[in-house]
């Protein structure tokens, strides 16, 4: 017989969005149930997405640094590691993250149910466990934070041992000499960096005309050049006709008539919201063709008792934003319906090698909007700290209003870009005239630091004014 439980709120999913909602509610005295379909908490972010890919990237970056530093590269003996080698590092990080996040739920007396969740009605959720037992949970508030999974077109045989998506690539057991990455979005570009950093030949197939077209074009061009300079073969405006898995290789037949052959393929073209098993029909909710749910600015679905946050609602599909969305939902449920909003300028961090990070407007957007702006640039190769660290590839670019000096956009390409961008972001968020590029001229920075790039870029930009 099913067991019945009553809670103040139910959160489906333990990724950043679910955690943000659950912690925000339980710390205010709500009795909260969290449902996780896997055996440990953390969601796709911890187990298959953000955490493992960034751990892999960090390991590869250090290998590259060692091999490029004469002090460490004794007698020209290169340090060599394989993809299975660095997976061990990722596994350790995942374990630490999982244990830490489980502790959050434990010490806050948040009840975690392990099983598959599906709706019974607008206030009731069924949890089916692996042993086929069932729990019935009811609450006045339900938050959907189920995340997303890699899109798998039906024509591609993902059961083939040499055809992977961004989840199953973490199970790669052999060390490929050549890999095809289909899809040149954020995930595809990050894994192109990882594999190329390990010395693997990479064919990056892009279905669009340039890499990461949402970026400022100079940042996109910089990444393209860096890939080209490091031997990544990029094929723009290509789509597959069929993917043929052989015993020892994979052949991608492109619609243009080309054929590309490699040891294996990583298919990384799109993601799908995890909604198909939720029985949304029971509550009158509809997901779109990509499995995504529609919400308002307070993350309310059309059903009064149900909210949704994170990847399952689409853009911006960032772990950082998902956590804040969950936190905002908690505040809304607690009664502060207009007390919190997601910030307008959400920073983007892309963990290629080197990193790319940006916040605010691109040059293309400002030009289209006919906003009078100017550009300030700083090349990392001119910074003492970058020269000392051997990280002199990259630049910082500031976009600011010609008249008010207000910072409109920050774009960074290079090592530590995702950290560097936050300095400028903090100034951009200042109100009442506090957002001005002149801050970076009038402030004394530690020397030598990467942050000094802001002073150099600000002076460069102000010198362009007349």
Image (cartoon, rainbow, N blue to C red):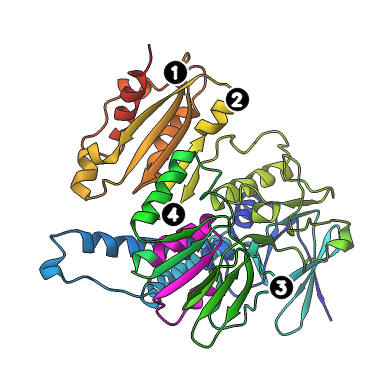
Helix, strand or loop status at disc 1: loop
Question: Against 18, is 301 above or below?
Answer: above
User: Quick one: label 2 or label 4, which is nearer the N terminus?
Assistant: 4
What quarter of the picture does the C terminus occupy? top left
What quarter of the picture does the N terminus occupy? bottom right
User: Quick one: label 2 or label 1, which is nearer the N terminus?
Assistant: 2
- Residue 279 image offset from top left, x and y in percent: 83, 66
- Of residues 163 and 277, the one nearer the viewer is 163
Marks 4 and 1 sit apart, C-alpha to C-alpha, by: 30 Å
- The residue where tag 3 is placed is 154
Helix, strand or loop status at disc 3: loop
User: Quick one: label 4 or label 1, which is nearer the N terminus?
Assistant: 4
Task: Tell me, yes or no, if residue 460 can be seen here.
Answer: yes
- The residue where tag 2 is placed is 369
- The residue where tag 4 is placed is 351
**Crowd class of label 1 (few under 14; some 14 to 19; many from 20; radius 10 Å):** some
In percent of the image, x 82 and y 77: which residue is there?
A: 2
Helix, strand or loop status at disc 4: loop
User: Quick one: label 2 or label 3, which is nearer the N terminus?
Assistant: 3
User: Quick one: label 3 or label 4, which is nearer the N terminus?
Assistant: 3
């Amino acid at each position: 017989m099913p067991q019945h439980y009553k809670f103040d709120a139910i959160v489906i999913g333990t990724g950043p969005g679910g955690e943000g909602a659950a912690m925000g509610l339980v710390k205010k005295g709500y009795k909260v149930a969290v449902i996780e379909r896997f055996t440990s908490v953390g969601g796709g972010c911890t187990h298959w997405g953000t955490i493992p890919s960034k751990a892999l990237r960090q390991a590869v970056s250090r290998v590259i640094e060692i091999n490029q530093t004469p002090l460490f590269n004794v007698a020209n003996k290169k340090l060599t590691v394989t993809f299975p080698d660095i997976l061990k590092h990722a596994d350790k990080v995942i374990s630490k993250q999982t244990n830490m996040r489980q502790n959050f739920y434990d010490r806050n007396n948040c009840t975690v149910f392990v099983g598959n969740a599906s709706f019974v009605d607008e206030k009731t959720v069924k949890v089916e466990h692996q042993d086929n037992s069932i729990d019935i949970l009811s609450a006045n508030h339900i938050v959907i934070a189920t995340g997303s999974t890699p899109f798998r077109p039906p024509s591609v045989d993902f059961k083939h041992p040499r055809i992977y998506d961004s989840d199953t690539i973490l199970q790669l057991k052999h060390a490929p000499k050549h890999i095809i990455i289909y899809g040149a979005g954020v995930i595809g570009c990050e894994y192109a960096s990882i594999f190329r950093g390990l010395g693997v030949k990479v064919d990056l197939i892009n279905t669009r005309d340039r890499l990461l077209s949402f970026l400022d074009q100079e940042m996109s061009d910089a990444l393209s050049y860096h890939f080209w300079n490091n031997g990544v073969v990029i094929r723009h405006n290509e789509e597959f006709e069929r993917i043929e898995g052989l015993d020892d290789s994979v052949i991608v037949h492109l619609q243009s008539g080309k054929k590309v052959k490699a040891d294996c393929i990583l298919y990384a073209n799109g993601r799908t919201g995890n909604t198909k098993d939720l029985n949304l029909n029971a509550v009158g909710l509809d997901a779109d063709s990509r499995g995504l749910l529609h919400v308002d600015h307070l993350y309310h679905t059309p059903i009064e008792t149900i909210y949704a946050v994170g990847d399952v609602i689409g853009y911006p599909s960032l772990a950082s934003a998902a956590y804040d969305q969950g936190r905002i939902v908690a505040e809304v449920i607690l009664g502060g319906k207009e007390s919190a909003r997601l910030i307008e300028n959400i920073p983007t961090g892309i963990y290629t090698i080197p990193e790319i990070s940006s916040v605010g407007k691109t040059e293309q957007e400002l030009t289209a909007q006919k906003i009078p702006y100017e550009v300030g640039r700083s090349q990392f190769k001119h910074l003492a700290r970058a020269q000392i660290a051997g990280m002199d590839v990259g630049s910082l670019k500031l976009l600011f209003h010609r008249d008010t000096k207000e910072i409109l956009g920050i774009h960074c390409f290079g090592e530590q870009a995702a950290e560097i961008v936050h300095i400028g972001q903090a100034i951009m968020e200042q109100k009442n005239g506090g957002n001005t590029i002149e801050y970076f001229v009038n402030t004394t920075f530690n020397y030598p630091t990467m942050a000094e790039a802001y002073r150099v870029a600000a002076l460069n930009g102000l010198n362009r004014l007349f």
